[in-house]
Amino acid sequence: MRRRGIPWLFLLLAVGPVVLGLGYALLYSLGLVGLLGRGFTLEHWGAVVRSADFWGALGLSTFIAVVTITLSTALALAAVLRWQEHTLRGLRTYAFYLPLALPATVMAFLIFQWLGDAGLLSRLAFALGLTNSTTDFPSLINDRWGTGIIVAHTLMATPFLTIFLANLYRSERVREVSQVAATLGLPPGRVARRLVIPLLLRQGRSTLLLYAVFVFSSYEIPLLLGSQSPAMLSVLTIRKLQRYNLADIPQAYVISVLYALLLVAVLLLWLGWSRYRRNTALHEA
Amino acid sequence: MEGYLDARQISKTFGRERVLNDCSLQLAKSSTLSVLGRSGSGKTTLLKIIAGLETADSGTITLDGTSLYRVPPHQRGVVYLYQEALLFPHLNVFENVAFGLRIRKVPEPELRERVDRMLGELRIQDQARKSPNHLSGGQRQRVAFGRALIINPRVLLLDEPFGALDARTRGEMQEFYRRIAAEFRITSVFVTHDLKEALLMGDRLAVMEGGSLTHYASREAFVADARTGVAAEVSFWQHLQLKNHE
């Protein structure tokens, strides 16, 4: 009996606060609680859904998450394909582990130093005669495409994903599996494309999805390196929550609830898709 | 004598350790050579050299009269099976078996027909859509055999393929292999450290010791050689029987 109760207790402790928080956010967004609560209304939901800021933030967050995870996965895969089971050996170990110790704020500051209007790259370009003045250098910080954010996140994600994929390479015994594939007739030039890359991506897909969610909802880096409009979803939410205009607070809660619903939908779709693939689909080699 | 598979005076050294010492091996078509040997005796290295996954320091290997020197593993038609099934974890059972055919760009209808037939032969047709990690050890080995056999390999190299299985499954798999070896007329080298398994699986027998391979002309010669351990085994069981009678 005691054992049977433990999972429920764990679930209550882990999920309970989140559900309570979301419940409060939902009630606040519907005008049912809070300082400005005047009874049930969909006014705040309407305001958010009609707001260009919200859709811009959603689009930018998705764009940054997709581009970051694509770039960093490609770089991590390139490293693992190049060094295989030796990826985390010798000096490379430091190269991949040390960046993980950098706080996001410090990484954002470093990127600011490099890519800012009068940053190191701008000065280097000017010194090399590539630009007429430091202000000619294209603005890569606080731009509408989130270039600085993508660079910072990619620099943080690449070492993490390299370590993850290198460990996956070893645990899945990719070297031996590749040898089996070779004796089955797979030429060396096709091993990466037909075997190693699909194998690592398939086995690591959950972690890649979770990292994309992490980038999607990141705060410090977009706050320091992102533009005012569009801003990333997290920055927009906090901005609305902390504004002097108290009428914006319910909108912050609307965005929070929408964000949570979006994530749950993505996760459910992912789980459903994985189950569908496992049960019915035949994977093309 | 020249065999279908003919390896002569193969030597290999790793660092200061000489792993293979002028090893020679002849194998007739559609026959199985059992190689008995302890761990570290050089069995795996010999198989890897035949498969092209390792290079020999010296010696020659011919298959059906053609030298395998400088022939890469993917063009040898020699499939190497490890102790573990090493299935492709990202593909289901059907796609694991279909792998070699997809590489050869076999048309889809023919591919499906051949894979379905192979799964039927292996008696795992109901597992086709399962992921490898949802299979038992014996089922995984069956899939590994199917994946190899479907491309009609010229030689199958089996490196203790049932070593990771429990005794009962191992017995079933030995029977299974004898059936498919006869059915598919497989030419194979079967490496094992299990005396009984060596005797059960091989048409011919050899012992690997200290990097050297000794062939036996007959089963009787194998039994008579003290190095194979048959005499010690027989003596053990006889002694045990006598003790029980006392």
Image (spheres, helix red, strand yellow):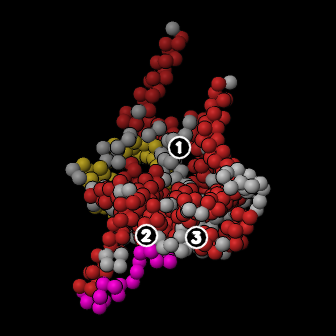
**Identity, as a three-letter code, of the amino acid under mark 2:** Leu
- Per the rendering, the mark at residue A11 is none
> What residue does disc 2 label?
A225
Residue of label 3: A57
- Residue at horizontal 77%, vertical 59%? A41
Disc 1: CA contacts within 10 A as few (<14), some (14-19) or many (>=20): many
Residue A229 included in the magenta stretch of the image: no
Marks 2 and 1: CB-CB under 8 Å? no
Q: Is residue A139 magenta?
A: yes
Task: Tell me the element at label 1.
Answer: loop
- Which residue type carries mark 1? Phe
Residue A136 seen from this side: yes
Badge 3 vs badge 2, beta-carbon distance below 8 Å: no
Question: What residue span does the magenta drawing correspond to?
Answer: A128-145
Q: Based on the displayed image, in which of its 4 quarters is residue B183 positioned?
A: bottom right
Q: Position of residue B69 (x, y in %)?
A: 36, 69
Q: Residues within 10 Å of mark 2 (few under 14, many from 20)?
A: many
Q: In this rendering, does residue A74 appear at all?
A: no
Mainly helix, strand or loop, the magenta region? loop
